[in-house]
């Protein structure tokens, strides 16, 4: 609804609308009250009573997203009604299970603002209830995901396995021993093993893990493994293909993508630095074929077939699980 900036609302009409909207609100006729409040707002009658009345109507009508958007907008004004709006905003977050956002907002208020004494206890209570409910919700969700995980393992649904790991990562959950044991199973997809290892790194997992991948077996602490882009061989390959960034940006972007996919599938069993030149040239050949262009250098002095096949195999494995945008 557009605001009628140049049309005057006569005092009697305004008073009548205000009284009718407040009566409808009091009698819990929220849809009717909202219609009259919107008409007042349309004439830029945007007092605290009118805006807060609209927020109550939206909440009672289950239109929490609209109410949340309005709160976020009016909170930006930092006016004298800031904490009244904030209280409504926190209530919306609590009712819609947005516990993390509520906790962050309360933490920010206590850290950077002078919260009125009358609201401190209420904010503390909302924070503590949110913290407990967040934990309960995570436990419930994790339980559901673990059931789905067992099903995905039984059916060898590798894409579903990877998606579940991504969800558990986002929740900062910790894998159980049964999941960790899958790192040594030969029939677990290499992409799934990489996702699991990165998950362990992100939660600062400090226990020794056993990994079998690509015919090799190692025991490592996840935090001691270099991240993909920090690995010496990856840095070296990147420095070789970097010359294409200015010459042929499209080819360069493709090679960076192929390189990451290749190393993701291999991780943590990455190639040695001495193989960097071979891999870089193989990537260039593959990229040129994808884009149907001719390269100045074809690496005729090197036997790249083995590397080309390996990169293409890993690309197929990556693409079978992860869909890049």
Image (tube, rainbow, N blue to C red):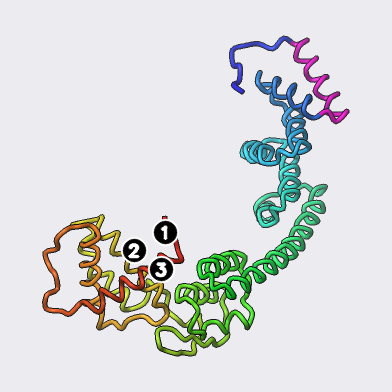
Of the numbered discs in the image, which one, if any, rests on residue 227? none
Q: Give the residues in magenta.
A: 11-29
- The percent coordinates of residue 226 (x first, y second) are 42, 78
> Is label 2 in contact with label 1 (beta carbons under 8 Å)?
yes
- The percent coordinates of residue 191 (x first, y second) are 45, 73
**Image quadrant where one finds the C terminus:** bottom left
Residue count near mark 2 (Cα–Cα under 10 Å), binned few <14, some 14–19, many ≥20: few
Q: Which residue is mark 1?
A: 324
Q: Which residue is mark 2?
A: 257
Residue count near mark 3 (Cα–Cα under 10 Å), binned few <14, some 14–19, many ≥20: many
**Between 310 and 195, which is closer to the camera in this rendering?**
310
Residue count near mark 1 (Cα–Cα under 10 Å), binned few <14, some 14–19, many ≥20: few
Which of disc 3 and disc 1 is earlier in sequence?
3
Which residue is found at the position 74% from the left and 61% from the top? Answer: 131
Which residue is found at the position 54% from the left and 73% from the top? Answer: 156
Q: Which residue is mark 3?
A: 318
Direction from residue 40 to residue 245 in the image, left or right? left
Q: Secondary structure at mark 2?
A: helix
Which residue is found at the position 77% from the left and 52% from the top? Answer: 123
Q: Is residue 214 above or below residue 90?
A: below
- The percent coordinates of residue 105 (x first, y second) are 67, 52
């Amino acid at each position: 609804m557009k605001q009628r900036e140049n049309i005057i609302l006569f005092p009697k009409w305004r008073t009548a609308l205000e009284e009718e909207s407040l009566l409808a609100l009091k009698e819990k006729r929220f849809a009717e009250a909202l219609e009259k409040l919107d008409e007042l707002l349309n004439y830029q009658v945007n007092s605290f009573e009118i805006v807060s009345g609209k927020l109550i109507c939206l909440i009672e009508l289950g239109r929490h997203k609209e109410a949340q958007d309005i709160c976020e907008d009016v909170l930006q004004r930092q006016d004298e009604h800031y904490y009244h709006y904030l209280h409504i905003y926190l209530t919306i977050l609590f009712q819609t299970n947005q516990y993390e956002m509520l906790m962050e907002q309360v933490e920010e208020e206590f850290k950077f603002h002078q919260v009125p004494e009358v609201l401190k206890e209420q904010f503390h209570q909302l924070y503590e209830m949110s913290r407990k409910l967040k934990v309960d919700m995570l436990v419930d969700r994790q339980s559901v995901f673990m059931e789905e995980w067992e099903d995905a393992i039984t059916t060898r649904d590798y894409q579903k396995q990877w998606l579940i790991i991504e969800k558990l990562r986002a929740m900062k959950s910790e894998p159980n021993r049964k999941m960790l044991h899958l790192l040594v199973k030969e029939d677990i997809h290499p992409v799934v093993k990489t996702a699991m290892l990165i998950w362990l790194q992100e939660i600062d997992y400090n226990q020794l893990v056993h990994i079998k991948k690509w015919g090799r077996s190692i025991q490592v602490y996840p935090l001691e493994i270099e991240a993909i882009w920090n690995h010496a061989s990856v840095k070296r390959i990147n420095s070789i293909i970097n010359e294409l960034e200015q010459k042929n940006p499209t080819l360069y972007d493709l090679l960076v993508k192929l390189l990451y996919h290749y190393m993701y599938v291999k991780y943590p069993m990455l190639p040695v630095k001495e193989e960097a030149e071979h891999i870089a040239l193989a990537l260039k050949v593959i990229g040129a074929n994808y884009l149907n262009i001719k390269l100045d250098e074809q690496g005729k002095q090197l036997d790249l077939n083995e590397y080309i096949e390996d990169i293409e195999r890993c690309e197929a494995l990556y693409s079978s699980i992860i869909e890049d945008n």
